Image: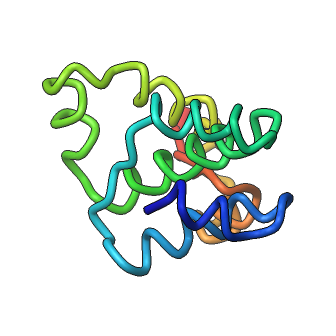
C-alpha cells in the first residue's frame, strides 16, 4: 500500500505516505526491503526510506512491545532504522522540561533520562 501511495503522490511528501498508512492501519509495519526498492525505482533518493525510519520510530513509541516482536521476527535492521530517529536527552532532575516539549523536536521520539 505504501508503494502505491508513494507512486501516486508527488515527490517531497514521503512522510505523508506513512501518515496515511498509520491512519488506515495503526499497527502497520511496512517491509523495509520493498520500500527501499520502491525508493530507488521511484527516484526518491532515499527520502522514502528515511520517512519509513521515522514511521518505525513512531510505531515503537506508540505501540509498546513492537520492538521486541520485530526483533524476534528477524527484523532487527528495521529497529535500527527506527533508532536513527530516536533522541535520548539527559535532563537534570530539577529541570522543568516537559516531555511534550521534546516530542515537538522531531518526527522520531525523545526519551528523558534523569541524572
Q: Position of residue 68 (x, y in %)?
A: 19, 33
Q: Nearer the viewer, residue 16 or 6?
A: 6
User: Up-down: is 5 above or below 86?
Assistant: below
Q: Nearer the viewer, residue 90 or 80?
A: 80
Residue drawn at (63%, 38%), measured in percent from left and top?
49
Q: Residue furthest bottom?
A: 23
- Is residue 102 in view from this perspective? yes
Q: Quadrant of the N terminus?
A: bottom left
Q: Nearer the viewer, residue 71 or 36?
A: 36
Residue drawn at (43%, 80%), measured in percent from left and top?
23
Q: Left or right: 114 with respect to 74?
A: right
Residue drawn at (45%, 69%), measured in percent from left and top?
21
Residue drawn at (68%, 45%), measured in percent from left and top?
48
User: Up-down: is 43 above or below 61?
Assistant: above
Q: Position of residue 69 (x, y in %)?
A: 16, 36
- Scheme by which the image is coloured: rainbow
Corner quadrant of residue 25:
bottom left
Corner quadrant of residue 70:
top left
Q: Position of residue 106 (x, y in %)?
A: 73, 55
Q: Left or right: 56 with respect to 16?
A: left
User: Up-down: is 101 above or below 14?
Assistant: below
Q: Quadrant of the C terminus?
A: top right
- Is residue 96 in view from this perspective? no
Amino acid at each position: 500500500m505504501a508503494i502505491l501511495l508513494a507512486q501516486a503522490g508527488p515527490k517531497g511528501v514521503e512522510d505523508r505516505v506513512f501518515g496515511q498508512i498509520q491512519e488506515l492501519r495503526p499497527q502497520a509495519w511496512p517491509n523495509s526491503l520493498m520500500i527501499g526498492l520502491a525508493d530507488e525505482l521511484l527516484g526518491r533518493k532515499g527520502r522514502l526510506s528515511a520517512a519509513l525510519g521515522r514511521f518505525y520510530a513512531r510505531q515503537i513509541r506508540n505501540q509498546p512491545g513492537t520492538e521486541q516482536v520485530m526483533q524476534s521476527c528477524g527484523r532487527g535492521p528495521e529497529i535500527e532504522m527506527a533508532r536513527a530517529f530516536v533522541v535520548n536527552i539527559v535532563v537534570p532532575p530539577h529541570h522543568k522540561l516537559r516531555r511534550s516539549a521534546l516530542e515537538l523536536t522531531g518526527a522520531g521520539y525523545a526519551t528523558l533520562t534523569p541524572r
